């Protein structure tokens, strides 16, 4: 199998590290060679972060270059637009519609761009956008945005739901498991 590439992008403090570890373990358990990069960027709360997950028969590097990503999973809308050039022409963006103002917007130097989903679609990009924060809160915690996104991403993988659940059970503390199951299901069915 040719190498597939997933970029997980967002803002520090949103749970992208757990999402990348969960996806990496899931794919490893499915028998793929997997490389997961470290988190790059300002991983402190509020800074832009990106993690790469690459899988296939044999993967030599964890790095994804422009135009190589099969999927971009974005925790924040502007981050989806910011990393769009890394997507393959037939790639898929799965994004949370939540907007977190970056520093130039906070300071008033810039305004947050409007109609980003429309602009990405107008550029020919396949965009699956949903309100993951609302779904995470419905599941029981705003911190479950990452699991809502994984539930949504599961639509694009030929991996049984039970396998996703088993991987999550191995990685999520027992006291948060039921909430995360619900978050996954809400993302999956949104």
Image (cartoon, rainbow, N blue to C red):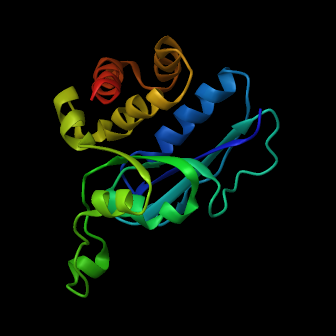
Image location of residue 151, percent across then percent down: 39, 29
Task: Indicate whether 45 appears above or below 16.
Answer: below
Question: Which is more toward the observer, 37 or 44?
Answer: 37
Task: Indicate whether 179 appears above or below 34.
Answer: above
Task: Indicate whether 132 appears above or below 176.
Answer: below
Task: Indicate whether 109 appears above or below 119.
Answer: below
Tell whether 25 sits left or right of 42.
Answer: right
Tally of marks: 0
Residue 46 in view (yes/no): yes
Image location of residue 21, percent across then percent down: 56, 37
Q: Residue furthest top?
A: 162
Image location of residue 159, percent across then percent down: 56, 20
Q: Quadrant of residue 24?
A: top right
Image quadrant holding the N terminus, namely top right
The residue located at (38%, 32%) in the rendering is: 152
Q: Quadrant of residue 177?
A: top left
The residue located at (23%, 40%) in the rendering is: 142
Image location of residue 182, percent across then percent down: 28, 21
Image quadrant holding the C terminus, namely top left
Tell whether 133 sits left or right of 122.
Answer: left
Q: Residue furthest bottom?
A: 109
Residue 45 in view (yes/no): no
């Amino acid at each position: 199998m040719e190498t597939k590439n997933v970029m997980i992008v967002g803002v520090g403090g949103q749970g992208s590290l757990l999402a990348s570890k969960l996806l990496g373990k899931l794919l490893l358990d499915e028998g793929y060679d997997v490389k997961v990069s470290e988190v790059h960027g300002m991983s402190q709360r509020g800074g832009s972060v990106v993690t790469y997950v690459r899988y296939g028969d044999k993967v030599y590097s964890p790095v994804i270059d422009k135009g190589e990503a099969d999927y971009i999973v974005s925790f924040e809308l502007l981050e989806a637009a910011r990393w769009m050039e890394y997507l393959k022409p037939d790639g898929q963006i799965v994004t949370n519609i939540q907007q977190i103002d970056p520093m130039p917007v906070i300071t008033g130097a810039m305004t947050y761009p409007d109609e980003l989903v429309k602009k990405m679609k107008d550029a020919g990009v396949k965009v699956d956008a949903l309100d993951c924060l609302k779904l995470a809160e419905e599941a029981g915690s705003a911190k479950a945005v990452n699991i809502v996104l994984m539930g949504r991403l599961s639509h694009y993988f030929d991996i049984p739901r039970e396998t996703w659940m088993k991987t999550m059970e191995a990685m999520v503390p027992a006291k948060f498991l039921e909430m995360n199951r619900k978050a996954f299901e809400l993302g999956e069915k949104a």
